[in-house]
Image: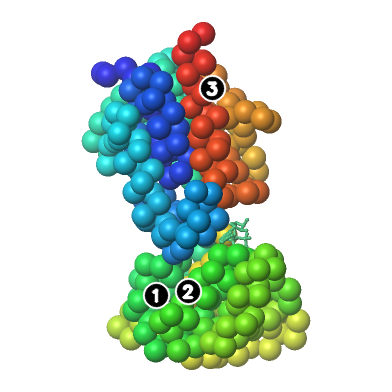
Amino acid sequence: MDIRKVVILGSGPAGYTAAIYTSRANLNPLLFEGSEPGGQLTITTEVENYPGFAEGITGPELMNIFKLQAERFGTEIIPERVVEVDLSKRPFYVKGDNSEFKAKTLIISTGATALWLGIPSEDKLRGYGVSACATCDGFFFQNKKVLVIGGGDTAMEEAVFLTRFASEVRVIHRRDALRASKIMQEKAFTNEKISFIWDSVVEEVLGERETGVQGVRYKNVKTGELTNELFDGVFLAIGYVPNTEIFKGQLDMDENGYIITRPGSASTSVKGVFAAGDVQDRVYRQAITAAGTGCMAALEAERFLGE
Ligand code: NDP
């Protein structure tokens, strides 16, 4: 079995930055793209806060540039997911969909995935009008009425984006105050197509697969009042879970499953295993912070191999 100096899991800003640094250090890194090549930025629209792009850039374009830069220095990219790792023996064992490797160091940048409400009707209608990605599915709702669930930046961003297509966008939030940043709140509040349903939670998504989403039933959490309202589409924007299932029991994690790294470092509870990006960051979750921690992981892996 091929023994690699560096194996990187994930192809978001953290993974590709780690790849750029380790390939420039002649460590010949192998990068598993994972189930969502390019990571979460590929399902966002305009990125206006990534330094270096004064006019903004779309998420997919930005990630393509990351990839080209990593390839330029010789990163080997495998279009597979990693389905199993064994960190108990050295070199570490890494099993992909169709491949197996040993790795002297491992950089985990598997990111995080959107959360769902977890109600059966949402599950039944996922892909039939229920989505967690406005960028992917917004186009299908030309001149339709859609609902966005959530009160954070993602919800505001998705709501504003959906006004490009939909005739009406409603945002439902379980409290009476948004969590989103002031600037995103302002964008949503001043958009004529967007209105809000406060203090309310979705109890059921109405419709069948044959008809698609036809509406939702929501409950006002203060009064208990139930309301049925017509909608053609429902977009989830209620946060994320880290993609750490295959590392459970092998690395220290917090109560939400985020990998714990040493403060000021990318090192984990296993020497030679580093974590970068959203998989270890529930606070900042930005492309630039992911890239920054990817760089830290790469430099630390290089140092570890040199010792
Ligand atoms: P957040 O965790 O910030 O917000 C999630 C929202 O969903 C909250 O309003 C929360 O309500 C609500 N929520 C959570 N669970 C449920 C549930 N089961 N039912 C109903 N509502 C629920 O996640 P985001 O995805 O919005 O943002 C994540 C991070 O990414 C943040 O740091 C954000 O700033 C950043 N981000 C930045 C962007 C930008 O700058 N352009 C764009 C997108 C994200 P409650 O408020 O009551 O907890």
**Quick check: 103 left or right of 234?**
left
Identify which amino acid the numbered label 2 is placed on: Phe
**Label 3 element class:** helix
Using a 10 Å C-alpha cutoff, classify the residue at mark 3 as few (fewer than 14 neighbours), some (14 to 19) or many (20 or more): many
Which mark identifies residue 161?
2
Q: CA distance from mark 3 to mark 2?
A: 39 Å
**Quick check: 300 left or right of 262?**
left
Say which residue label 1 marks: 138
Identify which amino acid the numbered label 3 is placed on: Glu
**Label 1 element class:** helix
Say which residue label 3 marks: 300
Is residue 303 shown above or below 213?
Answer: above
Q: Residue furthest right?
A: 222
Residue 228 in sight here: yes
**Tags 1 and 3 touching, CB below 8 Å:** no
Give the label, 2 or 1, closer to the camera. Answer: 2
Q: Quadrant of residue 260?
A: top right
**Marked residue nearer the N-terminal end (1 or 3):** 1
x and y percentages locating residue 211 in the rendered image: 33, 86
Q: Is ligand 1 closer than 8 angstroms to the Cβ of mark 3? A: no
Is residue 121 shown above or below 143?
Answer: above
Which mark identifies residue 236?
none
**Marked residue nearer the N-terminal end (3 or 2):** 2
Given residues 95 and 48, the one toward you in this image is 48
- Residue at 41% in and 38% down: 16
Is residue 194 shown above or below 254?
Answer: below
**Tags 2 and 1 touching, CB below 8 Å:** yes
Identify which amino acid the numbered label 1 is placed on: Gly
